[in-house]
Amino acid sequence: MNEMLVDDIFTADWAYTDMLLFCRFFVILLGLVSFKYVAVSFVETIKSSAPLVTALISYVVLKEKNGIFVQLSLIPIMVGLVLCTVYELSFTMVGFAAAIGTNVAEWYVTDFAHFCCCFFPGCCSLLLY
C-alpha cells in the first residue's frame, strides 16, 4: 500500500515536470516567432509588461487582488511602454501576439512551479523554474 502511494506521487511529480518543460518550450518558441516578425527592441519592450500581465492574469484566474501601491506602480511601466511602442515601425500583429503570449506562458510557468512547491514539499521552485 505504501509503495503504491510513493509510485503515484513520483508519477504525478514527473507529469508536473513534463508540463513545465512543455510550457518552457512554448515560451522559447513564442519568443523566436516574435523575433522573426518584429524588432528585438519591440519584443523586449512588450516583455517588460510582464508585471502588468502577471497582475491581470492573477486577478482573473486566481482571484488574487493586489494592493493599491502595486497597482499604482504599474502606471509608469505602462506609460513607458506606450511611449516606446507608439512609433515602432516594425509592428505586426503576429509578433505582438507572440510577445504577449510569451508573457502569459512565463506567468503560467512561474505560478505552476509555485503550485508544485505548495503541494510537493520536497520540490524546489528553483529546480522547476
Image: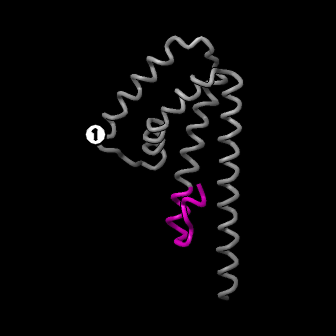
- Residue 32: image location, x then y, percent: 70, 32
Q: Is residue 115 above or below residue 9?
A: above
Q: Is residue 23 above or below residue 128?
A: above
Residue lying at the far left of the rendered structure: 68
Instruction: Report the magenta stretch's main SS.
Output: helix
- Residue 125: image location, x then y, percent: 54, 60
Q: Residues within 10 Å of mark 1 (few under 14, many from 20)?
A: few
Residue lying at the far front of the rendered structure: 41
Screen quadrant of the C terminus? bottom right
Q: Is residue 98 above or below residue 24?
A: above
Residue 29 placement, left or right of 51:
right
Q: Please name the residue that numbered disc 1 is placed on.
A: 68
In magenta, the rendered stretch is: 113-129
Q: Amino acid at mark 1?
A: Ile
Q: Which is more toward the observer, 69 or 32?
A: 32
- Residue 43: image location, x then y, percent: 59, 27
Q: Which residue is found at the position 60% from the left and 59% from the top?
A: 128
